[in-house]
Image (spheres, grey):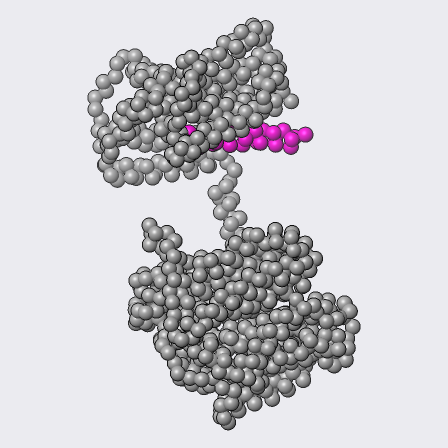
């Protein structure tokens, strides 16, 4: 299992070399990986369908008890299968769609890495592992939306998607940690085995934080705006990430946690209502758009809303509907997106109103587009019909929310029928329109996906028991928390859901026939956009920029004195606080017992330091700074530290040399600072001096641990084979420190060099 | 630039002496006061003195190797000195002693490491001094 999940990352790393070898056939070669994964996951189906989930554990960080564990049950297996199956077609498809694109190898790298992350996300049993994969999908999604990175629009959209999902991701992380703390485990399998948390006092917080994560990821109102913008990505990406897989991650997580979090009114209201509103918003926006990918993107928003709503309702029937709808949607939407890409690729336009009569030029595309669209519209005998009937039934059974949800569901279903017509009838039939490119049938690489996915939708519709026994039963058991006895069928008899289906079909056909008029009328609602979330996002971004600007101006103000003040005052406050807080104000002052010559040096130090601070002559300041340094060196020598003494003398010499070199470059000495400034400096300087004075006094007195110096003294000759302890420490005992220090030295030199040379170049 | 005749004469006499002293300090550092850092500082003050007495270009010629290259070589030596220990299964930078000696000097990784420090110090100081001096001369 670990290999199955990680293989995507490994192959992703090798993809550029594969591309060098296989060239135009890379798609078919790399497609072997997801195909093999599909087969691998398919071998799990019998065990899972028999109702026997499994947890697989690999130690990851054994010291911290963190495991890389995977949970294979009906829900995760269904997702894993969809991810690898659709992934296969996407990789092959991209070879045709992006043929000859100069960044194609990069595309393969990221899309395979994404696939692996997505597999990890749905299969992970550990919350933290799941979260890591979750963020990886956000990052790979960012790279894929911004694939055409030369275009500003696509960069902007990529950033928007990233920020919205990652902001939600942060909330999610907090929610997951809270959840794990409350439930007492970081493993899904253990949390799910425990009891529901509906009564717990932290439930509200957990629900809010996790839903922020899942709603942003799954583009629920009011966070739905990023998804249509994500269509800036190449079509294979939109088909894969922003329709079939990544955006369903939020739905996945909500479904995963349904048994633990799902039996409260708060859950029902938030998921049920927001899901229904998202569903309806998605369909309205879809009918309003003319760009084929935007239409499909908004219909994906609809689907995500539907899934969320069904999860919110949470009854047996709703969960069955949810799993069935999930399966149906992944199949038809994947196919439709691939068809959209083929249309765009062959005609050179994405605008549906500019397409027409393409059936003759692209017959196969037309056939499979129609099959997928029939499933989307929910027309028998496609699997989409089964799912839609179940959805109506669930909405009708949604306790006291039933009236609202049913109305929204029927209205949405109507619009969905219209959408199906818009994407699958409009471009192919009617009079032939001139397109930027002369259209002809898409290549096999681009047809394979729609053919297989469309046919699966048809097969599951004709023989619902196939979908039922293989996937839906086990999926429902995982989400509902217990085995549910049911069977899917195409014909439920004449009942209310069938009637609603007929109503929505009739309404949908009417809307489709009057699409141009409806669109015009809906266009007037664009006033809403001005107050929508996207405006909010833009405002937030501008605010963020202003904040960054402001804090940079405050913190990085470019004045040396301000940096020094910050450093010094922070030191005084922090050290002083700790020092006096812990030891009081009475330092262990003992009588001074220095020898006369020591006192003399100390006095010299003080006089020289005062002179440095008060002199008006630069050379005088440098010279007396030298006196300070040499006096310190003398102290080292007096207290038998010859190495330190020598080093200090040499450093002082070199400092004076450097200062003299710089001194010539400075303008004439002018006294800029007022008396007030100088007084302030005096106070700050005095405080720093006092703090360190006390610090040293206390440090002599306080001894938490045995000093290590004794060890060095003893080990220097036997262990380090040297009598100069300082040197043995530098080059042997603590050589790694020294290595770090010489790197810092070199860096400093490069910094100075760059500064001096760059300024010299500026002047030329 | 160019200093007085006295300074120039003194620098020419002092340079070899200071360099000898620096090598002496470097090699005896493990047992007596000295070591790569101190030795590097002594050597760089010798070259810095030359910059004052003559000019940066003359001093550069005397150094023969670019000071930046010297820095790089020193860092490389320091980092490489840690490797032999790993071949013996010990921790990176654990000292290794070989039974090879040239009179009083024996070959060992701390010495190689110290030579690395020596070169980095000279390289660092001279890079800065040259940069400042040349900016001044222009």
Pick the front one: A190 or A8: A8
Most prominent secondary structure in the magenta stretch? helix
Residue A627 in the magenta stretch? The answer is no
| Quarter of the image where the C terminus of chain B is located | top right
Q: Is residue B66 visible?
A: yes
Q: Is residue B56 left or right of residue A394?
A: right
Pick the front one: A696 or A256: A256
Task: Give the magenta part as a residue range.
Answer: A737-764
| Quarter of the image where the N terminus of chain B is located | top right
Residue sitting at x 40%, y 33%: B88
Residue at the far bottom: name it: A494
Residue sitting at x 47%, y 15%: B23
Q: Position of residue A734 (x, y in %)?
A: 37, 30
Q: Position of residue A676 (x, y in %)?
A: 43, 32
Q: Position of residue A583 (x, y in %)?
A: 23, 36
Q: Position of residue A473 (x, y in %)?
A: 43, 78
A375 in relation to B58, above or below: below
A202 in relation to A475, above or below: above
């Amino acid at each position: 299992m670990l290999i199955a999940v990680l293989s995507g990352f490994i192959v992703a790393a090798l993809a550029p070399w594969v591309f060098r070898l296989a060239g135009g056939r890379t798609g078919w070669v790399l497609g072997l990986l997801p195909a093999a994964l599909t087969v691998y996951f398919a071998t799990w189906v019998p065990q899972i369908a028999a109702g026997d989930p499994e947890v697989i554990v690999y130690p990851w960080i054994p010291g911290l008890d963190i495991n890389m564990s995977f949970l294979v049950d009906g829900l995760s297996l269904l997702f894993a299968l969809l991810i690898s199956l659709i992934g296969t077609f996407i990789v092959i498809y991209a070879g045709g769609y992006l043929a000859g694109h100069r960044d194609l190898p990069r595309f393969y790298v990221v899309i395979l890495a994404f696939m692996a992350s997505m597999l990890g996300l749905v299969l992970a049993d550990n919350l933290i592992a799941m979260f890591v994969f979750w963020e990886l999908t956000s990052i790979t999604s960012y790279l894929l939306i911004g694939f055409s990175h030369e275009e500003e629009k696509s960069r902007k959209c990529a950033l928007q998607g990233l920020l919205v999902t990652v902001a939600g991701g942060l909330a999610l992380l907090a929610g997951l940690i809270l959840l794990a703390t409350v439930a007492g485990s970081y493993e899904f399998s253990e949390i799910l085995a425990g009891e529901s948390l509906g009564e717990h006092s932290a439930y509200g917080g957990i629900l809010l934080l996790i839903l922020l994560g899942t709603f942003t990821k799954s583009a629920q109102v009011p966070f739905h705006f990023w998804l249509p913008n994500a269509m800036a990505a190449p079509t294979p990406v939109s088909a894969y990430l922003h329709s079939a897989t990544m955006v369903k991650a939020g739905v996945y997580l909500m479904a995963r946690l349904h048994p633990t979090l799902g039996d409260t009114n708060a859950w029902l209201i938030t998921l049920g209502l927001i899901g229904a509103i998202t569903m309806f918003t998605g369909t309205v926006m879809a009918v309003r758009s003319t760009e084929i990918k935007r239409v499909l993107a908004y219909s994906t928003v609809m689907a995500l809303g539907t899934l969320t709503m069904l999860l919110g309702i949470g009854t047996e029937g709703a969960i069955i509907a949810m799993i069935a709808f999930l399966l149906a949607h992944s199949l038809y939407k994947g196919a439709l997106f691939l068809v959209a890409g083929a249309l765009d690729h062959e005609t050179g336009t994405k605008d549906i109103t500019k397409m027409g009569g393409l059936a003759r030029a692209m017959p196969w595309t037309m056939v499979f587009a129609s099959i997928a669209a029939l499933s989307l519209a929910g027309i028998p005998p496609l699997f989409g019909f089964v799912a839609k009937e179940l959805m109506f039934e669930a909405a009708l059974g949604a306790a006291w929310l039933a009236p609202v949800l049913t109305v929204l569901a029927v209205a949405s279903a109507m619009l969905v029928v219209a959408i199906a017509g818009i994407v699958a009838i409009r471009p192919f039939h009617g009079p032939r329109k001139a397109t930027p490119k002369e259209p002809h049938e898409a290549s096999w690489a681009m047809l394979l996906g729609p053919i297989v996915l469309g046919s699966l939708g048809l097969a599951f519709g004709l023989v619902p028991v196939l979908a039922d026994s293989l996937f839906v039963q086990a999926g429902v058991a995982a989400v509902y928390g217990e085995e549910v006895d049911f069977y899917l069928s195409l014909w439920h008899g004449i009942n209310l859901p069938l009637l609603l289906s007929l109503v929505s079909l009739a309404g949908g056909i009417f809307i489709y026939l009057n699409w141009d008029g409806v669109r015009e009328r809906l266009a007037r609602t664009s006033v809403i956009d001005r107050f929508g979330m996207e405006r909010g996002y833009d405002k937030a971004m501008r605010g963020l920029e202003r904040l960054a600007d402001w804090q940079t101006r405050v913190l990085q103000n470019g004045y040396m004195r301000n940096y020094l003040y910050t450093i010094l005052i922070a030191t005084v406050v922090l050290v002083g606080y700790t020092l006096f807080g812990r030891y009081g104000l009475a330092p262990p002052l003992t009588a001074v017992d220095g020898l006369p010559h020591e006192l003399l040096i100390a006095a010299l130090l003080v006089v020289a330091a005062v002179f440095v601070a008060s002199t008006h002559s630069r050379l005088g300041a440098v010279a007396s700074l030298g006196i300070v340094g040499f006096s310190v060196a003398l102290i080292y020598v007096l207290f038998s530290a010859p190495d330190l003494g020598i080093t200090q003398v040499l450093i002082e010499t070199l400092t004076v040399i450097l200062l003299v070199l710089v001194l010539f470059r400075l303008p004439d000495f002018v006294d800029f600072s007022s008396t007030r400034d100088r007084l302030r400096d005096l106070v700050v300087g005095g405080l720093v001096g006092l703090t360190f004075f006390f610090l040293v006094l206390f440090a002599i007195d306080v001894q938490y641990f045995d000093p290590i110096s004794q060890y060095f003294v003893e080990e220097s000759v036997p262990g380090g084979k040297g009598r100069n302890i300082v040197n043995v420490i530098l080059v042997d005992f603590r050589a790694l420190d020294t290595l770090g220090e010489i790197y810092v030295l070199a860096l400093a030199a490069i910094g100075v060099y760059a500064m001096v040379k760059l300024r010299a170049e500026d002047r030329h | 630039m160019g200093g007085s005749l006295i300074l120039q004469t003194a620098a020419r006499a002092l340079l070899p002496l200071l360099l000898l002293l620096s090598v002496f300090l470097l090699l005896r550092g493990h047992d007596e006061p000295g070591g790569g850092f101190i030795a590097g500082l002594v050597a760089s003050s010798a070259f810095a003195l030359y910059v004052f007495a003559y000019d940066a270009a003359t001093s550069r010629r005397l150094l023969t190797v670019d000071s930046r290259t010297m820095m790089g070589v020193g860092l490389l030596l320091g980092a490489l000195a840690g490797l032999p220990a790993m071949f013996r299964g010990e921790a990176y930078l654990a000292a290794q002693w070989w039974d090879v000696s040239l009179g009083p000097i024996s070959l060992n990784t701390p010495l190689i490491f110290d030579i690395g420090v020596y070169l980095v110090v000279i390289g660092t100081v001279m890079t800065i001094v040259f940069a400042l001096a040349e900016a001044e001369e222009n």
